[in-house]
Image (spheres, helix red, strand yellow):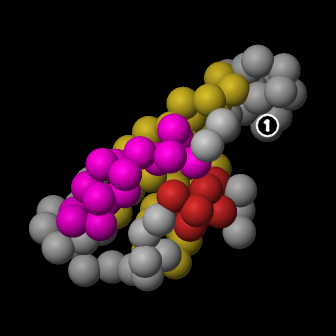
Amino acid sequence: MPLTDVFPPATTDCLIASRRSHGAGYVVKGSTTDGDPIEHHFFTDPDSDSITLFVDTTRDEYSKQGWIHRVCSIPEISAAELAACMQGR
């Protein structure tokens, strides 16, 4: 799936603009290779180069079934950088 399908330009534009105002959130819904649902919740904070990510694996039968928290430094928000954050890079 192309990154622009996961992170459409309007979404990345909104996340970029949110850094100059009140912050924003965006949810990516997907599934594991076994078909279990997984959600990635991205949040921006005003005046911050970081993105906070919460990954909901509570319905993933073959995981620890919980929430993963990570903070990614992303000075320039792009689809590629958000995807890298999803992958833990």
**What residue sits right under mark 1 in the picture?**
64
Q: How many marks?
A: 1
Secondary element at image label 1: loop
- Rendered residue at 57%/48% (across/down): 3
**Nearer to me, 1 or 64:** 1
State the extent of the magenta-drawn residues as a range.
Answer: 3-18
| For residue 33, side relative to residue 40 (left or right) | right
The x, y position of residue 25, in whole percent, is: 33, 49
Tag 1: amino acid: Lys
Q: Quadrant of residue 89?
A: bottom right
Q: Quadrant of residue 2?
A: top right
**Nearer to me, 79 or 38:** 79
The x, y position of residue 81, in whole percent, is: 56, 66
| For residue 57, side relative to residue 21 (left or right) | right
Q: Quadrant of residue 13?
A: bottom left
Image quarter (top left, top right, bottom left or bottom right) of the N terminus: top right
**Nearer to me, 59 or 20:** 20
